Image (cartoon, rainbow, N blue to C red):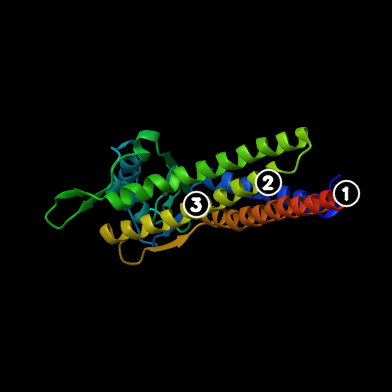
Amino acid sequence: MVDNRYATALVIGSVLSLLATVYLSVAVGTQHWYQYSSPPVKHKASNATELKGEFINGDFDEMKYSSAMYRLNGTLGLWWRCIMVPGPSHWYDAPDPKLETWCVSFTLPQQFTSKYRHSEDNSEEEDLLRTYLWRSQFLLPLVSLALVFLSVHVGVCACLCRTFTPILVVGVLHLLAGLCSLGSVCCFLAGVDLLHQYSRPPEGVEGSLGWSLYLALISFPLQMMAAALFLWAARSHRKNYTRMTAYRVA
């Protein structure tokens, strides 16, 4: 029979784990990890259309799509990059132009594309640090979600077998998942900072963290609290069971 304290810890831990999974899933699927705010400069519609066409249909080039995001209030996510341009019948010099959001997804081969360091003499050198930071930032959240789903299966097996021992494994899996979530945020921020060193935003363009990144960041403490509750429940129940066994033998 499970003590009420342990059952309560398991329920609270499960709720925290569910919230963390939802937050992280939403963060992975949205594009508001980092956003740029461009100054209200008047552009001709032809220029905006040209930038939009190059952004959507042009070759995958980090410097080109970064430049478009700088100038057109772009947003960047793990799997998406977006810009905001006026509609077909609107001009930038209108009093209040209606802006439309256009997004392009990163394909899986593009996610594994090497990053390069552009020097002043127009030569390119592969930047291994940025390459592995970029790959880590989208792989770590997937690993985190996979660990949580694995812990769900372990928890179901524990319920079916009516044993508390696998709950310790559930806690360890949540601990690793939390570290992966935090690692993804750190890799993303480090990668953006290095990108700005090689491709500086124009004067007046401001960058800020988006709500998607904050969702991913919030999932980290939720997963750690869930892990702490699972580990505490497993260890405390095991100690209590050992004491009860020893008492009965005596």
Mark 1 Cα shell of 10 Å, populated few (<14), some (14-19), many (≥20): few
Q: Secondary structure at mark 3?
A: loop
Kindly identify the amino acid type of the residue bearing the numbered disc 3. His
185 or 67: which is nearer to us?
Answer: 185
Q: Amino acid at mark 2?
A: Leu
Q: Residue at x 47, y 54 (%)?
A: 183
Q: Amino acid at mark 1?
A: Arg
Residue behind mark 2: 18
- Using the numbered discs, state the Cα–Cα distance from disc 2 to disc 1 in whole angstroms: 39 Å
- Looking at the image, which residue is at 32% across and 46% down? 51
- The residue sitting at the bottom extreme is 204
Decide if residue 144 is on the left or right side of residue 247.
left
The foreground one among 146 and 248 is 248
- Report crowding for label 3: few under 14, some 14 to 19, many 20 or more residues within 10 A (C-alpha): many
Name the image quarter holding residue 160: top right
User: 63 or 240: which is nearer to us?
Assistant: 240
Secondary element at image label 1? helix
- The reply to whether discs 2 and 1 touch (Cβ–Cβ < 8 Å) is no
Q: Is residue 97 visible?
A: no
Instruction: Report the residue that reaches farthest toward the left.
Output: 121
Give the side of residue 208 with respect to residue 145, left or right. left
Q: Position of residue 87 (x, y in %)?
A: 44, 44
Return the residue at label 1. 248
Which mark identifies residue 32? 3
Where is the N terminus found, in terms of image quarters? top right
Comparing marks 2 and 1, which lies closer to the viewer? 1
Residue 237 percent across, percent down from the top left: 77, 51
Q: Is residue 209 above or below residue 111?
A: below
Mark 3 to mark 1: distance in Å? 59 Å
**Left or right of 68 in this view: 235:** right
Q: Position of residue 10 (x, y in %)?
A: 75, 49
